[in-house]
Amino acid sequence: MSCRWTSRGGRRRWPAATLVVSRDTGSLHLSSALKRPVVAVYAPERFVENSQQFAPWRVPSRILRGGAFDAVAPAILRAVEDLLGGPSGGA
């Protein structure tokens, strides 16, 4: 699978994004508004409340419980692969 990563400076590119990975921030909700698939990573301390109340709306999404990067990164990659149609990105 081929991925192009962008960060805070890449907000102008959101309309062209295929998929967005974000914490529970404005970028998550903006991505949903732009109808982009989302991998949402919520803080473990309030995961149940936040993931239910503030989940991405009407877009394909995967919701994950946050934590240490080493523990969460594999789950993020699996969620991205799932949303894009497999390890090859559906190609």
Image (cartoon, rainbow, N blue to C red):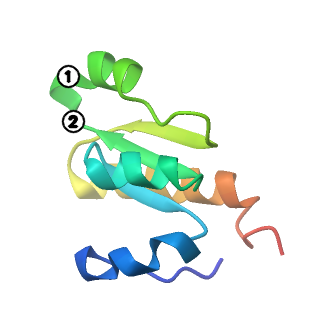
Name which residue type carries label 1: Arg
Quickly name the residue at label 1: 46
Q: In which quarter of the image is the N terminus?
A: bottom right
x 64%, y 59%: residue: 81
Numbered tag placed on residue 43 in the rendering: 2
Sort mark 2 into few (<14), some (14-19) or many (20+) by Cα contacts within 10 Å.
some
x 25%, y 57%: residue: 69
Outermost residue toward the left in this view: 45
Q: Are marks 2 and 1 in contact (CB under 8 Å)?
A: yes
Outermost residue toward the right in this view: 91
Sort mark 1 into few (<14), some (14-19) or many (20+) by Cα contacts within 10 Å.
few
Name which residue type carries label 2: Ala
x 84%, y 75%: residue: 91
Q: Work out how far the residue at label 2 is from the one at label 1, CA to CA, in angstroms.
A: 6 Å
Out of 45 and 28, give the one closest to the viewer: 28
In this view, 15 is above or below 33: below
Out of 86 and 58, give the one closest to the viewer: 58
Q: Could you tell me if residue 6 is visible in this image? A: no
Out of 12 and 39, give the one closest to the viewer: 12
Q: Could you tell me if residue 53 is visible in this image? A: yes
Q: Where is residue 12 in the image (x, y as percent from the top left)?
A: 39, 79
In this view, 25 is above or below 46: below
Q: Position of residue 72 (x, y in %)?
A: 34, 50
Query: Quarter-wise, where is residue 8 in the image?
Result: bottom left
Numbered tag placed on residue 84 in the rendering: none
Query: Quarter-wise, where is residue 16 in the image?
Result: bottom right
- For label 2, the SS is loop
